[in-house]
Image (cartoon, coloured by chain):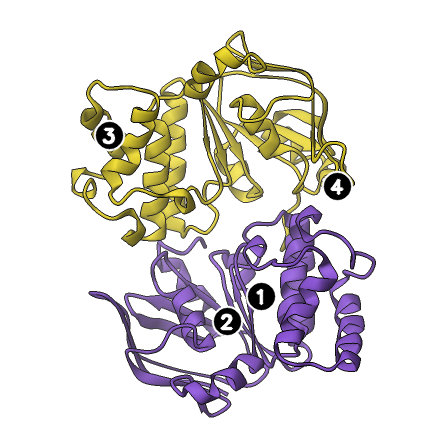
Amino acid sequence: MIQFEQCTYHYSKKTPMETVALQSVNLTLEKSQLTALMGRTGSGKTTLALLAAGLLQPIGGNVWVDGLNTRIKKNRPEISRKVGVVFQYPEQQFFCPSVGEEIEYALKNYQIDNPQRKLTLQALEDVGLNASYLDRNPFQLSGGEQRLVAIASIIVSKPEYLFFDEPTAGLDALAKRSVYSIIKNLEHSGRGVFLITHDTKRVKREVERLIVLHQGRVYYQGSVDDFFTQSHKMEETGIIEPFC
Amino acid sequence: MIEICDLHFQLGQKIVFSHINLEIKQGDFYAVIGGNGSGKSTLLKLIEGLLMPSSGKITIFGMDTHNEELRFEIRKKIGFVFQNPENQIIASTVLEDLCFGMENLGFSREMMTERLKEVLTFTGLKGLENRNPLTLSGGQKQRLAIASAIITDPEILLLDEPLSMIDPEGQRDVFKLIVDFHKKNKTILMVTHDMAIASKAEYLVFLKNGAIELCGKTAHIFHRLSQYEELDI
């Protein structure tokens, strides 16, 4: 499990631009069921994922991943293998000339030698692509295919916890369905999957558990259905249907 | 005022548009929809003159985008807003960001002051002039991107998924801003995957397999879209 204990994080600390991202957050994330993280822009959703992956260190409190404190430097390689983050528009971070190399990069990074090509093929299969993609240039794929390759490059190292930050932004309905199907498969394989999103419609349809962040604090934890029956909570946290 | 005549556009081996035609009149509000890779963003770039047709032509107020001498005049008529506002924020304060386009187009000091006053009020950015744009909320950043695009008072506003990266409240504010700008008899072309947003446009153009699959008044054609699985109806 991932535990946030009195966790605080500020951006641009001790500058005129200092911004409170998270304030004394106590939260436990478990591998139980697909969980959506929602809240206004700037409510701390992405910061929470970055802290869980050890990519940021709290300025107050602690974050523990399966008992490993993210503050301790020697824990970080193991934490980064345990926690994967699929960033918004991950395909913008492609830098390899072929899909195969792009996916294998993580394996090389984690010094997983054995056998890289087999794991890469498995990851491609897991996102619904086949071996014909291995030698293709990732920059010449469609937007939907690029997103799938980007997800494959994260799941290839088999992280136990996965944060997806707006995974379907900019995708058409077909590609969205593919991404949600991958997310569901990851959930069923026993991973902890956390979905950062503004897509109220999809959350209602696909997710059961919800965590709402508001002004850097945990405002709600519970079932999706319960939250969406409380209109005052929806208004207060800005989780609304924009064009009703 | 935007005329697309027999437009063919090819990127390497891939045919993006195969001989399409479209006429958009002053004051029209179009949503451009279609699956990934259907050419929605490419269409906007062709209209802006950032890409050139392989054959056929696009004219803006009668000016052919092929004509290099007219390119500056064409750009003055068009404002462009990208999906991610951070990709078009270039200055360290809101004020500097808003002035950049006007300085480029040679606006006088008096004109700049007048436009700033009007646009800051219109976009609700008044009071944020000295803020670093990167410290604004997602909705505020997108409003700044739109403000920077409309401050030169273009006749046409092209928007590429302007609401996809902001929260629902921000979406509501930004969409209202787009609608308010349209009410000034401005022409809007907005790419979107969100059918709820597309349904609010006056006209729809649906791109598929290098062609215009459907085009017309939203009220007349929206019901026909449910058969297409790439659209999230």
Q: CA distance from mark 3 to mark 4?
A: 42 Å
Task: Give SS at disc 4.
Answer: loop
Type of residue at label 2?
Thr
Residues beneath discs 4 and 2 located on the same chain: no
Which residue lies under the disc numbered 3? A120
Rendered view: A9 above or below B66: above
Q: Chain of mark 3?
A: A
Residue identified by numbered label 2: B218
Q: Amino acid at mark 4?
A: Met
Q: Nearer the viewer, residue A163 or A128?
A: A163
Q: Is residue A93 left or right of residue A204?
A: left
Which color was chain A given? Answer: yellow
- Tell me which numbered mark, 1 or 2, is placed earlier along the sequence: 1
Residue at horizontal 31 percent and vertical 51 percent from the top:
A139
Q: Is residue A209 visible?
A: no
What residue type is disc 1 on?
Answer: Lys
Residue A83 screen position, x and y as percent: 46, 22
Residue A116 vertical placement versus B57 (above, below)? above
Tell me the CA gap for discs 2 and 3.
45 Å
Name the residue at the right extreme. B127
**Three-letter amino acid code at the position of disc 3:** Thr
The residue carrying mark 1 is B200
Real-space Cα distance between discs 1 and 2? 8 Å
Q: Residue furthest bottom?
A: B62
Q: How far apart are labels 4 and 2 at the CA level?
A: 45 Å
User: Mark 3: few, some, or many residues within 10 Å (few <14, many ≥20)?
Assistant: many
Q: Which chain is purple?
A: B
Given contact means CB atoms under 8 Å apart, are the residues at marks 1 and 2 in contact? yes
Which quadrant of the figure contains the C terminus of chain B? bottom left
